[in-house]
Image: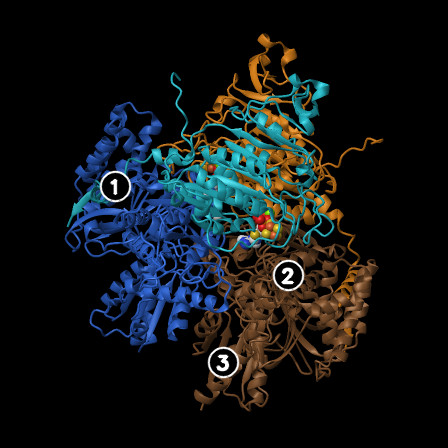
Chain colours: A cyan, B blue, C brown, D orange
């Protein structure tokens, strides 16, 4: 490559807003109906603040959700939206993204919606790299159906459907996405507004499928599932491209590579900052991102990297699919072409 | 064999005959040649009169080996002509398909005019000089057979030769060989003295116009595209391959120059989901599948009913239940189309009646879906899908207009937009993303009429449930009265079919009438809503017979709706309805029950 | 409130009353308290006679805040008693639910006996000495209300106090507080002079026996387990949570000591798939869901039809279509149960008629599924699921035996095993893995009868399709004739319900008869096959009314099957059928149409 | 742990055959109906040879398949079997494995069956670690429906449904499985009988879910898809636990770790055998296995590791689920217990 061309953004093709938009423009008049204290409120507030900053027209934003507490999201935003059926939002969004490159398409989903019933659509949307941004609200529980364990619940979880503890090993959504060839994978936390903003902005600007896992507290059925992480001295490992991966009080802990090649954590003071690995979110190969994802403990959650694990350029499915089409002619000419087509080459006259 | 049949069909078409074809593939991909399971056949009926089916019994059978003979001989009528390549009639090959004696010599074919000869060697000999290896040379035997058939039916060779020139334009060796084989076959007919008659089938009296040959799945693809084009929408197909619907995907995938977007989804649920997405985005979302795939799509179709968005779901029915017999035809999904969703989720159902009719049926489906904002189920079947017939190419300019009527302005006095305000047809307002000021949310929860906001109000749910049903009934506006074919109005017996049974019914009626009996026939294309005059039609006849390739699904509907004691006539053998059997049964009904 | 209702129900039960309850949850998980959407209510009818519904109109309403009053006041009959906690009747709270004036003082409740007082303060006062914080103290108001109701209906406090002792055995502070609140409520009734009457409801004349209270979902879970146990099989439930079916999973997940294996699957398809696997492995595979989940299971249910394996699919219906109103009841899935599969895939369908009847219906489903090797669909609904009533505990030893009759020996003269050889009932032979010598393969493709080998033979498919239907019809052996309740045989009007409508129909019939009119009633439990005498029953009456919580799905079936002009009576409001409305309508039909 | 106990095998609990079994015992009388030259034949032959060697009773072997050419497999084996519906075999097998610990349960599936329509059941069966062995026949095409591209087809594949080339990025089934927390993941090749045998034996002996991807040639619709790998000097990288990862003619090539931590290939002569990594299939952490999986090129396939990527001990779902049950008493006692249960604690008598 001789020239440096800036890659197409996830939003290129979406018309820009004419005047400035404000948060208020994006607030619908539907009454918000989550339980008091639900983490969904914080995400909604952040998102309503973020949308006007993206600079694209409000009417060109579409939010598709499945079913679950979190999937009520689209109702609260004054954009185009669809509250669809359980698990199918990525498929529906694929149809929207393919036919309408002028739209900014978001998917809102939960850990049950995306990873249980909707797991297949999720991994296929990621593999294909459809230009959509997926916000996965992970509260590690089925909220709407009143508290059964989910595919991200820790093993041993006691719920109505697992009265003596669940026996399933949970998914690590980041690992799963990376195994499914995802080109943008990130994680953030409901209550960390600035981080949420930053990650979502990067996600929507990524052209192709972006998965953002959002740790979301469900005070009713799984309260404080992330309390261990959110605590001041907690185990949130903030990933930043190009920076050494440190965390903990005063960044006293770091992620190092063990002699066998796998990643581990160690006190920086002991190993020296030079041993701490530097994050490369843009590495073509997902090996590092995957290794980082494994630092998440799948049990009680005391350690979890957040930020952008992976953000690489790759052709987006819908761009490629559209590129195979020849430009559709004006209506008249279109009908004439079609008349020729259906008439075909081997006709006879009676 | 498929190619020979295909080209011979074109010869019939060029001669102005009416025709109908039925290719028959083995269930296995490449079942070993020479086994019964591996036989692939092509059936063709052509005539100087209207032809409605590929025929039950054949007049001429061309069999290229013992397996083909064994598999098809039962379909050859007594006194018919058998042309058979005896090159492979070795003891081993005969045994492989269960012949203990050579049928060509054991007298079992006495009632048939048998023309057995070493067709393979003749073909190989005809191309001997052209430098092909033996396998290639042997392949020309199909063209030899075609040449022979051309001679037998007095067809000009030119059409076939033209086709070969196009097909093998850049492979001159193969061109020369195939041309030589055709000519050799033709010459063989002329010189061998095996055949004492040649046949001339004059043109059929068909309506003046430009015709082409079309299969059901191709016509269906074109009909969908025409519907989208006339409405000014992009056609989006979400599909997951499944026999016998895959060709709809294959055909549309080739139409990229017509702006068709195809999406091969991970499963049927994603396929219909993406189509719903495309429709929400303001295009025409379509999905095509067969029975098992329909089952998977049911939940999403229900969503589309609730969203009130256009969507076309094509069900190319195959023999069920479960995996059933994927390559065989049936009409077992009518109930599923009408009732296979949770809750009260009414939607229009249309069934194509013939391969060419798939175009019109698909076009109508598009028109109803778009103008009423509703999912529509379009029923075809494995027989229609693969069968072909002459098609008078429609003039797109003459087809009824289709108006999506997108909302562009707020529709409330206060400047708001309500997506569930309705027009006289009860179709809701349709605003698509990108339209400023009309931002709104739709969803699968029950909604307040008008505003579309979530509503748990009992009275609203009651009203909405009845409203969705009422809207379905308004579709009657697009449903013409059912025409009855009752030439002199004297019939006491009405035979009412739907979908692909109407072809055999027409053919059977011809036979019944030729036998001197009166019979009225009609074919339903609209299964929901039913034509307005249907009750009256049913009551007009002393007896109503409803043939179906299922256990009586339409029958149930008619009895429930009109309280008329219609008689069910059912076949579920994976085959199209047999016209001969039907004709015989009708005659005995007329003679015995209606005396 | 749910707990108060629950305990008060137990008091009624202990007093020998018949009763029926209906809890009503908000659609949102924890919609903010004090909003209309956040109101949770518990409705209870008890009486000295047979009770079939929780009642439409209530005699006594206890409202703990303005939202509860607003949401439920319309259900209180004129002249009824309102007990209302006025602690929260502030201007702000009133406005929040749309009251512009205080309904307690503006005269709008003049037709009602209003007892308004600061129940909250009384409760808090009663526990003041017990060291609770304010929030905990306030929570005792429900127990205060219960004590008051116990006084009002002359119930012994002991039952409640016993319960509290069990419940709070290890939390003495809460025990003391709750006991204090109950006693204070009771004492308030006695001393306050607000109430001029106390009521005594004598025991209802119910059959002698041991009774317990049971909800539909619990009874269903027990019925399934009883079926498996009597057959000597393990019960395996594959399920994916969905309202209102989730409790079936919750109940069975707690029965690990009874050997029940529950599998919370990734989706409904996996849930039913695993159940099919469990049945193939020789256990009783069951799955439970609601409408949207049913749609997803359709393909696998079709497979089970083809495999001819036992399977029970419980559909706890909710208001549809699509996501609809998940917490509301409906009978919209009858068509889906009967017809929602590709091809001809007949299977037995059974509907429970009352909460307690869910046990018997589930047991019958198990018996049919196992003895006929067939999937069975068991229909319940959101009303039955959550509603409760007295249940005469069945003696397991008296239930009909269930025999899985596993094959243990080859069944062919040549020592082979054919899985599709049939008994007199047409049920196929069932050999399970682990049985030596009976190794065999089953699958979704059409199979040759007897051997079970894959078959594409047309005649075989025809025969198998009819055979599967014939087998379904043999299930009639387990279907009793429909009993009709027509006390003196003089009725000209028959009201025929199915599933949960039979409760309100019985209640309405009582009213109609009390008004001096004759009416016959019957409730269908078996929807497929239908009882043998049904046609005769329908023809016996001048008029047949079929009430359904849908747009007439059973009606269609009856009209089609029997050509009887039955009249559809439909409600689709997400609520149980209203007995009062039905009774009034029936009376006017008798007076006007049947003069 | 003070004692070394041998872990339960995937087959423990399955009764042993009484007499010796032979290949013939496992051959059913159904006529095999794949196309001439289909790779399925070779796998079938190997499998029929393998089963008697496992030593368990024939009648305790169950094979469940979905739909596809490869899914005809069960018909050809004289064991218990089910040819189910498209994509659902892992779910059905889960029900069998949970209820019958005395059975050896196999799943046979294709790249379409397992990764397209059945993707969700596959990843959930792997995550849960149900004790089943999954043979995934990957011919990178839909065979039975006559040749559409599949989720493993290389991008740009021309088929009937992609006449100008597919635009989907393919899955790497090994990466996907590892992302889904699989505890046993391996790959082998239809024509390499000894390798196939070895890998399948290890798979069935693994307790929990084992996924074996089998590269399978479809001569009709995707001929020679693996020819580049199968060639004598081809790029099959044979993974063996505890051995350096070398491949190519005379093992002249090796897999090394680059300074950035990712894996790459290099001539052993250049880097020295000391730089070549040693495979550890039993590493608790899947980072190495994942990194190895990325050496597979997803395009024309000239390089692909085969063998066992990962084989770690973890409790199997069905064992855990059964462990929660108390032993079911004899019929009489069972009914008495049940009578007590349904009678409950709060009864009254009329
Ligand atoms: C087909 C179908 N199956 C099941 C349900 C019931 N259901 C609704 S939401 C949900 C799970 C919600 O969990 P999650 O996605 O984690 O969302 P949350 O409520 O926790 O935000 C389930 C099982 C449904 N609506 N549709
Ligand atoms: C529900 C459903 N959808 C689609 C099909 C059609 N179908 C049968 S097999 C198959 C794909 C086969 O591909 P693969 O799994 O790779 O198996 P292969 O034939 O290549 O061995 C499809 C799409 C079906 N049988 N059922
Ligand atoms: S149940 Fe949990 S996730 Fe759902 S709204 Fe309430 S707090 Fe939020
Ligand atoms: S189509 Fe391909 S995979 Fe299927 S049987 Fe033929 S060669 Fe094998
Ligand atoms: Mg959740
Ligand atoms: Mg394949």
Q: Which residue is mark 2?
A: C370
Which corner quadrant of the image does residue D220 belong to? top left
Disc 2: host chain:
C
Residue C250 visible in this rendered orientation of the protein: yes
Viewer-nearest residue: B55 or B110: B55
Residue D68 in view here:
no
According to the picture, the residue beneath numbered tag 1 turns out to be B7
Circle 1 — which element? helix
Disc 3 with disc 1 on a shared chain:
no
The residue identified by callout 3 is: C538
Observer-nearest of B18 and B70:
B18
Residue C309 in picture, x, y percent from top left: 60, 56
Q: Which residue of the protein is positioned furthest toward the right in this rendering? A: D2
Camera-near label (3 vs 2) is 3
Answer yes or no: do the residues labelled 3 and 2 have beta carbons within 8 Å? no
Name the residue at 52% across, 19% down: D234
Q: Residues within 10 Å of mark 1 (few under 14, many from 20)?
A: some
């Amino acid at each position: 490559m001789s020239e440096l061309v800036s890659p197409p953004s996830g939003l290129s093709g979406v018309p820009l807003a004419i005047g400035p938009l404000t948060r208020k423009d994006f607030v619908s008049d539907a009454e918000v109906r989550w339980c008091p204290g639900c983490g969904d409120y914080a995400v909604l507030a952040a998102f309503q603040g973020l949308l006007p900053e993206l600079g694209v027209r409000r009417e060109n934003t579409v939010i598709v959700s499945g079913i679950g507490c979190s999937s009520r999201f689209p109702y609260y935003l004054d954009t185009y939206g669809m509250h669809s059926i359980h698990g199918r939002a990525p498929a529906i969004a694929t149809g929207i993204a393919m036919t309408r490159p002028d739209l900014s398409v978001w998917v809102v989903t939960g850990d049950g919606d995306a990873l249980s019933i909707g797991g297949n659509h999720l991994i296929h949307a990621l593999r294909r790299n459809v230009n959509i941004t997926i916000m996965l609200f992970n509260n590690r529980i089925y909220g709407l159906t009143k508290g059964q364990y989910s595919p991200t619940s820790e093993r041993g979880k006691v719920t109505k459907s697992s009265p003596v503890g669940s026996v399933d090993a949970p998914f690590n959504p980041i690992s799963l996405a990376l195994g499914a060839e995802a080109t943008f994978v990130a994680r953030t936390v409901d209550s960390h507004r600035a981080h949420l903003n930053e990650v979502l902005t990067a996600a929507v600007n990524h052209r192709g499928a972006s998965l953002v896992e959002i740790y979301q507290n469900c005070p009713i059925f799984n309260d404080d599932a992330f309390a261990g992480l959110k605590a001041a001295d907690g185990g949130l490992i903030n990933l930043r491209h190009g920076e050494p991966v440190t965390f903990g009080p005063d960044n006293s802990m770091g992620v190092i590579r063990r002699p066998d090649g796998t990643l581990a954590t160690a006190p920086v003071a002991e190993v020296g900052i030079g041993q701490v690995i530097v994050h490369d979110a843009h590495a073509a190969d997902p090996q590092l991102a995957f290794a980082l994802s494994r630092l998440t403990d799948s049990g009680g959650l005391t350690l979890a990297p957040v930020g952008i694990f992976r953000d690489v350029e790759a052709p987006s499915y819908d761009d490629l699919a559209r590129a195979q089409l020849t430009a559709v002619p004006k209506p008249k000419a279109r009908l004439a072409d079609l008349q020729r087509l259906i008439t075909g080459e081997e006709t006879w006259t009676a | 064999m498929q190619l020979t049949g295909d080209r011979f069909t074109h010869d019939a078409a060029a001669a102005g005959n009416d025709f109908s074809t039925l290719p028959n593939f083995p269930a296995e991909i490449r079942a070993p040649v020479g086994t019964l399971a591996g036989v692939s056949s092509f059936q063709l009926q052509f005539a100087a009169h209207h032809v409605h089916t590929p025929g039950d019994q054949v007049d001429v059978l061309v069999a290229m080996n013992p397996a083909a003979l064994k598999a098809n001989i039962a379909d050859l009528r007594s006194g018919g002509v058998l042309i058979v390549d005896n090159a492979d009639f070795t003891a081993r090959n005969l045994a492989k398909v269960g012949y203990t004696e050579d049928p060509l010599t054991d007298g079992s074919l006495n009632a048939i005019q048998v023309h057995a000869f070493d067709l393979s060697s003749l073909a190989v000999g005809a191309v001997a000089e052209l430098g092909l290896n033996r396998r290639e040379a042997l392949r020309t035997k199909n063209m030899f057979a075609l040449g022979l058939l051309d001679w037998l039916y007095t067809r000009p060779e030119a059409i076939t030769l033209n086709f070969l020139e196009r097909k093998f334009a850049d492979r001159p060796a193969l061109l020369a060989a195939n041309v030589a084989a055709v000519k050799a076959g033709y010459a063989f007919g002329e010189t061998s003295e095996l055949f004492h008659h040649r046949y001339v089938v004059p043109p059929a009296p068909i309506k003046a116009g430009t015709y082409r040959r079309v299969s059901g799945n191709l016509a269906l693809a074109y009909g969908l595209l025409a519907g989208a084009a006339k409405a000014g929408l992009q056609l989006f197909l979400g599909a997951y391959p499944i026999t016998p619907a895959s060709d709809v995907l294959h055909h549309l995938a080739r139409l990229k120059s017509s702006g068709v977007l195809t999406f091969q989804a991970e499963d049927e649920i994603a396929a219909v989901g993406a189509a719903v997405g495309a429709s929400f985005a303001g295009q025409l979302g379509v999905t095509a599948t067969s029975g098992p795939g329909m089952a998977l799509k049911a939940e999403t179709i229900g969503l589309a009913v609730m969203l009130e968005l256009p969507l076309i779901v094509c069900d190319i029915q195959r023999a069920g239940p479960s995996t059933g017999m994927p390559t065989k035809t049936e009409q077992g999904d009518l109930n599923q189309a009408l009732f296979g969703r949770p809750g009260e989720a009414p939607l229009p159902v249309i069934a194509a009646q013939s391969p060419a009719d798939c175009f019109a049926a698909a076009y109508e489906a598009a028109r109803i879906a778009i103008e009423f904002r509703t999912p529509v189920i379009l029923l075809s079947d494995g027989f229609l899908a693969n069968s072909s017939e002459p098609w008078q190419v429609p003039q797109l300019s003459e087809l009824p207009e289709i108006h999506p009527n997108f909302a562009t302005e707020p529709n409330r006095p206060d400047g708001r937009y309500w997506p569930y305000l309705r027009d006289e047809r009860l179709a809701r307002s349709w605003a698509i993303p990108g339209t400023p000021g009309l931002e709104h949310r739709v969803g699968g929860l029950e909604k307040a009429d008008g505003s579309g906001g979530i509503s748990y109000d009992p009275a609203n749910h009651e009203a909405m449930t009845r409203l969705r049903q009422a809207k379905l009934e308004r579709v009657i506006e697009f449903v013409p009265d059912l025409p009855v074919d009752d030439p002199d109005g004297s019939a006491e017996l009405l035979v009412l079919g739907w979908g692909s049974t109407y072809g055999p019914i027409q053919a059977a009626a011809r036979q019944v009438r030729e036998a001197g009996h009166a019979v009225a026939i009609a074919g339903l294309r609209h299964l929901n809503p039913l034509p307005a005059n249907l009750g009256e039609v049913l009551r007009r006849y002393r007896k109503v017979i409803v043939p179906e390739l299922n256990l009586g699904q339409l029958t149930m509907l008619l009895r429930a709706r009109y309280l008329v004691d219609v008689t069910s006539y059912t076949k579920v053998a994976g085959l199209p309805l047999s016209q001969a059997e039907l004709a015989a049964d009708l005659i005995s009904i007329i003679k015995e029950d209606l005396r």
